[in-house]
C-alpha cells in the first residue's frame, strides 16, 4: 500500500467537518457500523479509551463514597408511567419487548433508556430509616433510545454510560450531591481529557424529564459547535412522591427522600475526537491514551536496531508508561501515519544512524516537535514530554474556547455572530420558553446553559427586550 | 435488635439447602429481588465481588492477547437464523423487541442471549487476510434468556457475563484456544475462588447450540449437586460457512476461519456461596473478598479503643490489605454476626483489656480459630493468616470433591449412589444419547462431562451394557 494512503483516506476538517469526524472514527478503528441499524460496534481501540474513562471516573466516584450496583435492563410499562414528566420524555423513544420466547408478555417492557424508575422502585423497598441514607449508587451499563438519525458515539440507539442515582434525607444534601458530581465530571474533563467546559444550569426547556434542576457541562468542539458532555439532575422529592419512597427520620416522622441522578456516556469520546483531532487523525491526551508511546524502528532489519527499539520500549514501561514497539513488516512512514491516525501522543524513532550516536528521536503528536536525546534518557524525557503535551493540549483547548466565546446585546448582532462565528454566544434572557423557541427557529442555536458564573451584559432579553433574568450561553449543538 | 437475629434469620443448610442459599444471598445483601419478574438487583456487596472477578479474569484474558470490544445488544431475527442449530437452541428463550417508540419494527430483534451471530456478522466484514488473524475479542455485558423458573445468580432472565469470540486461520489454532481459555477459567477458579473443578468435554446432547465441541469446568456444591461453572466452545468452521467469513491465506487461496467462544457469568458467585458457605452465612476466599479484614472494637467508647482500632485498620491497609473499621453504634456481637454473614475472611477484635496488654485478637472466618498477637504485628499476621485461609479453603473444597466423587460399574449401584450419596458418579458410557436420556429420567442425573483424564472403569456402558466409549462424570446439577 502507498505510504500516504491512510492519511489521504480522511477528508480534511476544513472541507467537511462532519465527514472528517466519521472518517477519523473509522480510520482510527474506534468504531465500525453494524448491521443492527443505529447501533455501533466499538472496536478495541475505541473500547480501550472507554475502559480508561471508566477506570478514572469510577475511582473518582468511589472517593466520594459511591458504590456500584446493577439493576435489570427492562422496565415494565406501568413502572415507567409512574412519574408523568419522565414517561412523556422517554416513552416516545423506547424500544419495547413484547414477547418472551413464543409467548406474548402480559405487560410489555422497554429496554431502559435510563433507570430512574428502576432505582426508585428499588429504593421504595430498601430505604426505611434515616440510617439508610444517603444511598449513593451507580451502575455501568448500556441504554437504548430509539433515535431516528444516528452518528458514531454522538447519537446511537444503544450507548454505554454510567448512571448514578442517590437518595438523601434533605433537599440540601441532594443539591450538594448534584453539584458535587457535576464538578467530578468537569474536573475529569479538564484534568484527564484536557477538555475545558462551561458549568451551568439547563433552562426549563432543556432540563431532564422529571428533574427539578439539571446541571450540565458544555464543551466546544473544534468546529464551534457545543457538545453537552455530562449532566447531573436534582429531582427534589418528585420521584419519591411518585414512587412512595419514605423514611423514618430522627424525629420519628415519616419523610420523603430527595434524589439525584447523573450520567456520562461514550458520547464523551466524540468530544475527545472533535476537540483535539486534526487532519492527520486522532490526538489523544496522554492521560487517557491506551498507548502513550509508540516506538518505531527505522531500517529495522539493520543489526541492533530492533533490539535497541525493544530496549527503549522496556525502559518506557519501567518508567510506568504505556508503550508498544511497532515491529510490523511495514515502512516507517506507514507506521508514522498509523501512529498519528490513532492519536498516540508520542513516538520514538530509532535507526542505525541514531544507534551509532547512542541517540533516539522523540516526536510529539500534538505539535510534531522533534527532540533528540540519548537512549538512556528516553524514559525520563518521554515522561516529561507527555506531561507537557497534556498541559498544552488543555491550554490550546482553553484558548479555542475563549476565542470562540462571544457576547451579544442586540438581536441582529446575536444572529450574525451565531451565523458567522461558530462558538458560544453569551446573551441575556428573560426566562421565557417562547424566546428560546424563537432563537432556535431563527438561528439554530439552543440555550446550552445558564453559567454558574453569572454576569449582567445588559438589562433586557436578547430576543424580546423584556427585563433579563439570566445570562445564557447559546450555541448550535450536537 | 437482638444480637442473634441476623444468624437466626437464615435456615440451616442441613434442613433446607435451597432455602439456606436464598437466605444467605439476601442476608449477606448480595442481591434483592426486583419487580421485573425473573430479574435481580445486584447490590453493592454482590457487585463488588463481580468487580473483583472481572478485574482478575480480564487481566488473565489480556495476558493471552485478548482485546475487549462492544457489540450491539440486539440481534435482528434474520441474523439469529443464519446458523440452524444455534437458532433452535436460543430462539425459544429469546426476548423480542417489536416496537421502536410507537412504530412497529420492520424486522423484530431479540435481546442477545449470546453474541455469536453478531461477532460473526462483524468478522465477515472485518477479516480479509491471514494477517488479520487471529482475532481475539471479548466483551463484558449482560444477556437475556427467558427462563421460566429463576434463582438468584444461578438462573435469571438477565445475567452479567463475559463472552470471548475468536477467529483463527486453522482448526488447530481454534482447538488450542478453546482449551487455553478453559484452563484460564479452571486456574482462576482454583487459584482465586478456591473452587476445584473437573475439566472435560460435554456430550453431544449437552454441548452448545452450534458448536463442534464444548469444554466445561464442573464444580461440586456443598449439597453434592454439580454446577457448570464456565464453558469454552470450538465451532470449527460451521459458523464461518453460515456467515461467509473467509480470508486470503498465505498461499493466496480463500479459506474459512475457525472460531471459538467462551464465557463465565455471575453464576460463579452462586458457586462461591454454595462451595464455601456455612450456617453463619457467606465465606469469601481472601483473594476475591472486597473486604478482607473487619476491625471490630470492643467497648468502643472506652478511652483509646477506637483510636487503636483505627490504627490497626491503617496498618492493615499499609500491608496492602482491604480492611475496614466497623465503628457503628451496635454491639460487638452484632458486628461479629454481620462480618460472618458477609463472609469477611478475617476479623480483628480489640478491647480495653487487649489494649492494656498491647495485643489484639485475630479470628478466622473459616475455622473460627483465634490468635492473640501484639498490635504492632497485626498487619504481618493478618497477611499470613489470609494466605493460610485461601490455601485451606481450597484444600477443604478439594477434600469435599474427592469424598463426594464415586465410581459405579453396575446400573443398580449407580442408581443407588445417585440417590443416596449426592456428588459425582464416574461411570462408563456407550456414547448414545438414549442412555443419557434414560439416566436423566430414572435418576435425575445428567452427564456433566467426559473428563480429560480418562480411565476405563469397565468395558461396558453403565446403562445399556454395550461397549463403553468414554468415562463420564454424572450428577444432579443446578
Image: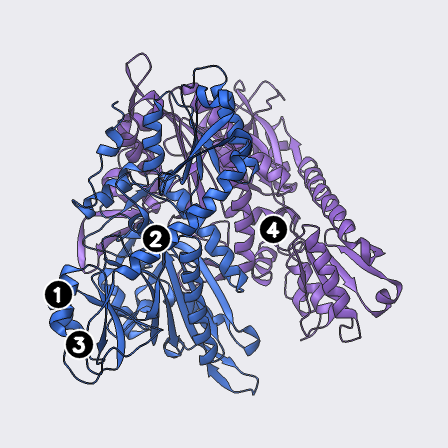
Chain colours: A purple, B blue
Q: Earlier in the sequence, mark 2 or mark 3?
A: 2
The chain letter for the residue carrying disc 1 is B
Percent of width and height locating residue B327: 42, 24
Labels 4 and 3 in the same subunit = no
Circle 4 residues within 10 Å: few <14, some 14–19, many ≥20: many
| Secondary structure under the numbered disc 2 in the rendered image | helix
Between the C-alphas of marks 1 and 3, the distance is 13 Å
Q: In the visual, does A467 lie left or right of A119? A: right
Circle 2 residues within 10 Å: few <14, some 14–19, many ≥20: some
Check disc 4 and report the residue beneath it. Answer: A273
The chain letter for the residue carrying disc 3 is B
Q: As displayed, is residue B245 above or below residue B344?
A: below
Check disc 3 and report the residue beneath it. Answer: B462
Closer-to-camera residue (A136/A223): A136
Q: Is residue B100 visible?
A: no
Q: Earlier in the sequence, mark 1 or mark 3?
A: 1
Check disc 1 and report the residue beneath it. Answer: B416
Check disc 2 and report the residue beneath it. Answer: B396
| Secondary structure under the numbered disc 3 in the rendered image | loop
Closer-to-camera residue (B381/B427): B381
Amino acid at each position: 500500500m502507498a505510504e500516504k494512503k491512510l492519511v489521504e483516506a480522511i477528508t480534511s476538517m476544513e472541507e467537511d467537518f462532519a465527514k472528517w469526524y466519521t472518517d477519523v472514527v473509522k480510520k482510527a478503528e474506534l468504531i465500525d457500523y453494524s448491521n443492527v441499524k443505529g447501533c455501533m460496534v466499538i472496536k478495541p481501540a475505541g473500547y480501550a479509551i472507554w475502559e480508561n474513562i471508566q477506570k478514572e471516573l469510577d475511582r473518582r466516584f468511589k472517593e466520594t463514597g459511591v458504590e456500584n450496583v446493577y439493576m435489570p435492563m427492562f422496565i415494565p410499562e406501568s413502572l415507567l408511567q409512574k412519574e408523568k414528566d419522565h414517561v412523556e420524555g422517554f416513552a416516545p423513544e423506547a424500544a419495547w419487548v413484547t414477547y418472551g420466547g413464543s409467548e406474548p408478555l402480559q405487560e410489555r417492557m422497554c429496554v431502559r433508556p435510563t433507570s430512574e424508575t428502576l432505582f426508585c422502585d428499588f429504593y421504595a423497598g430498601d430505604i426505611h430509616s434515616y440510617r439508610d441514607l444517603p444511598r449513593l449508587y451507580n451502575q455501568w451499563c448500556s441504554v437504548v433510545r430509539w433515535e431516528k438519525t444516528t452518528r458514531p458515539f454522538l447519537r446511537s440507539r444503544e450507548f454505554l454510560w454510567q448512571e448514578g442515582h442517590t437518595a438523601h434525607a434533605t433537599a440540601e444534601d441532594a443539591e450538594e450531591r448534584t453539584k458535587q458530581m457535576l464538578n467530578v465530571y468537569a474536573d475529569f474533563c479538564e484534568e484527564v481529557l484536557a477538555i475545558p467546559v462551561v458549568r451551568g444550569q439547563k433552562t426549563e426547556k432543556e432540563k431532564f424529564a422529571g428533574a427539578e434542576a439539571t446541571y450540565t457541562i458544555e464543551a466546544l468542539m473544534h468546529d464551534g459547535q457545543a457538545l453537552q458532555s455530562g449532566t447531573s439532575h436534582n429531582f427534589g422529592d418528585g420521584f419519591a412522591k411518585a414512587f412512595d419512597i419514605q423514611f423514618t427520620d430522627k424525629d420519628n416522622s415519616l419523610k420523603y427522600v430527595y434524589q439525584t441522578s447523573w450520567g456520562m456516556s461514550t458520547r464523551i469520546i466524540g468530544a475527545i475526537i472533535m476537540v483535539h483531532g486534526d487532519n492527520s487523525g486522532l490526538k489523544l491526551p496522554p492521560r487517557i491514551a491506551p498507548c502513550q508511546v509508540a516506538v518505531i524502528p527505522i531500517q529495522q532489519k539493520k543489526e541492533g536496531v530492533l533490539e535497541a527499539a525493544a530496549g527503549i520500549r522496556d525502559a518506557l514501561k519501567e518508567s510506568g508508561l504505556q508503550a508498544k514497539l511497532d515491529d510490523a513488516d511495514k515502512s516507517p512512514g506507514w507506521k508514522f501515519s498509523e501512529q498519528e491516525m490513532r492519536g498516540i501522543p508520542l513516538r520514538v524513532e530509532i535507526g542505525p544512524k541514531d544507534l551509532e550516536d547512542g541517540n533516539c528521536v522523540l516526536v510529539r503528536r500534538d505539535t510534531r516537535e522533534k527532540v533528540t536525546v540519548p537512549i538512556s534518557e528516553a524514559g525520563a524525557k518521554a515522561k516529561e514530554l507527555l506531561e507537557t503535551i497534556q498541559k498544552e493540549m488543555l491550554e490550546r483547548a482553553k484558548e479555542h474556547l475563549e476565542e470562540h466565546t462571544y457576547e451579544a446585546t442586540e438581536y441582529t448582532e446575536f444572529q450574525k455572530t451565531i451565523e458567522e462565528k461558530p462558538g458560544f454566544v453569551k446573551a441575556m434572557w428573560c426566562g421565557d420558553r417562547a424566546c428560546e423557541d424563537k432563537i432556535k427557529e431563527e438561528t439554530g442555536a439552543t440555550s446550552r446553559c445558564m453559567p454558574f458564573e453569572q454576569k449582567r451584559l445588559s438589562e433586557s432579553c436578547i430576543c424580546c427586550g423584556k427585563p433579563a433574568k439570566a445570562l445564557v450561553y447559546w450555541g448550535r449543538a450536537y
